[in-house]
Structures are given as C-alpha cells and as structure tokens.
Image: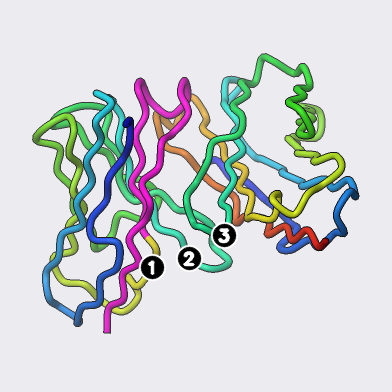
Amino acid sequence: EAQVTQNPRYLITVTGKKLTVTCSQNMNHEYMSWYRQDPGLGLRQIYYSMNVEVTDKGDVPEGYKVSRKEKRNFPLILESPSPNQTSLYFCASSLGGVTNEKLFFGSGTQLSVL
Amino acid sequence: AQKVTQAQTEISVVEKEDVTLDCVYETRDTTYYLFWYKQPPSGELVFLIRRNSFDEQNEISGRYSWNFQKSTSSFNFTITASQVVDSAVYFCALSAESSGDKLTFGTGTRLAVRP
C-alpha cells in the first residue's frame, strides 16, 4: 500500500532533550516536506526536499533540522526542543514537487514539549 | 511572498444546505498553483483539487465545486447539499512559481454539518 509513515504517533518529551521524528515513503517520491499545525495558524512548512541531499527552508525552520540521505526517508530533528515546538507535525511527499502533484500526508505526530 | 487568507474560521450548517468556503490568495507571480485539502476529524489530510493560474475554468466533482477568479484573487469551494461526512477542516493552499516548492496554507475553515 502506498503510504507515508511517520513515527512516533505521539511523543512527550522535556525541554532540551534531542528527538527525531521519522518519515518514510514507499512511493519513490522525489519531494518530501515537513509541516507543523497549530490552532489558528493552519499548517506551516518547516523544511522541504526536492531530492537526496537537497533541502530548503520553509516558513518556520528555526529550531529544526532535516536530512535527506536516502530518497525514502526524511527525518525531522529537534536538537534542543522547547515548549513552543509543541505541535502536530505532518510529513508529506509527492512525485515531482508541490506544484505539479498532490501531496500525500502521513498520519501526523503529536509532540508535547514540557 | 505568498499568502492565503481563509477568513471564515468556523461554519455551521444543517445537512442538505449548500455552503461556500472562501479562499483569498496573494502573490505577485503570474504562474502559481492553488490547492484545497480536507482534514476530517480523524486527522489525516486529503487532497481535493489542484488548479494552476492559467486555468480559470470552474470545476465540479460531484457535490463539490470550485470557483477560481483571478480578478478577485479568490479560489472558493462550494459544497452542494452538504452531508454530515463533510464535517472537517478545509485548507486552501498556494504555491507560486518564484517560491520554488514552498507551499503556503491558509489557517483553515472548520465546517460542521449538523443532521
């Protein structure tokens, strides 16, 4: 089944403790992206990647890192999480970029930073 | 810079009513793409439609229709004869050519359809 898989689904952590949210897609998609969803703010793009070893900042990249060492994986790294990073996170992928294709989204990761 | 405004935060209708969700966008590009996504209570995000700036034809898909008007920078979404299963948060999104593959979402409109 074609899908975008995020893990974990729920995560509670403490300020400053490094964490990684994994994202994997099995559709051989070139484009992958991370969004955060906050009440009243909609979805905001954190980082995106058009190909292996190619990443670009979205609208809210501060406090986040990403890497794209393999086509299928696009982990989101919070080196020193803070409470303002408490949010619902979505990973998404598409075949050839966001303008030409629809995005396939993962199920989301609810992160709470205490 | 690109921006999407969904001024309606929440809408509540009774089943079988028609409802229109508004989307106003801003971009200086002449080439851009507009999208609508649906987020039902289960939380996943589902693609509904993609439209490029050169195609102003309105689109109908079953009970759903979209009205794209460049003159008013709007891409409104209408649900005809709404059903309870239409209850969801709906997001409009924009990607302008000069922004690369950056996708900007609006803040969403929560639609509640009451039986």
Mark 2 residue type: Asp
- Indicate left or right for A94 with B56 as reference: left
Chain of the residue that carries numbered disc 1 in the rendered image: A
Q: Nearer the viewer, residue A68 or B30?
A: A68
Q: Quadrant of residue B78?
A: top right
Mark 1 residue type: Ser
Q: Gap in Å between the C-alphas at discs 2 and 3?
A: 15 Å
Q: Which mark is residue A87?
A: 1
Q: Nearer the viewer, residue B115 or A47?
A: B115
Name which residue lies at 54% across and 62% down.
A41
Q: Which mark is residue A79?
A: none
Q: Are marks 2 and 3 in contact (CB under 8 Å)?
A: no
Count all numbered tags in the image, as a single digit: 3
Work out whether residue B28 can be spotted: no
Magenta residue span: A89-114
- Indicate left or right for A45 with A26 as reference: right
Q: Are marks 2 and 1 in contact (CB under 8 Å)?
A: yes
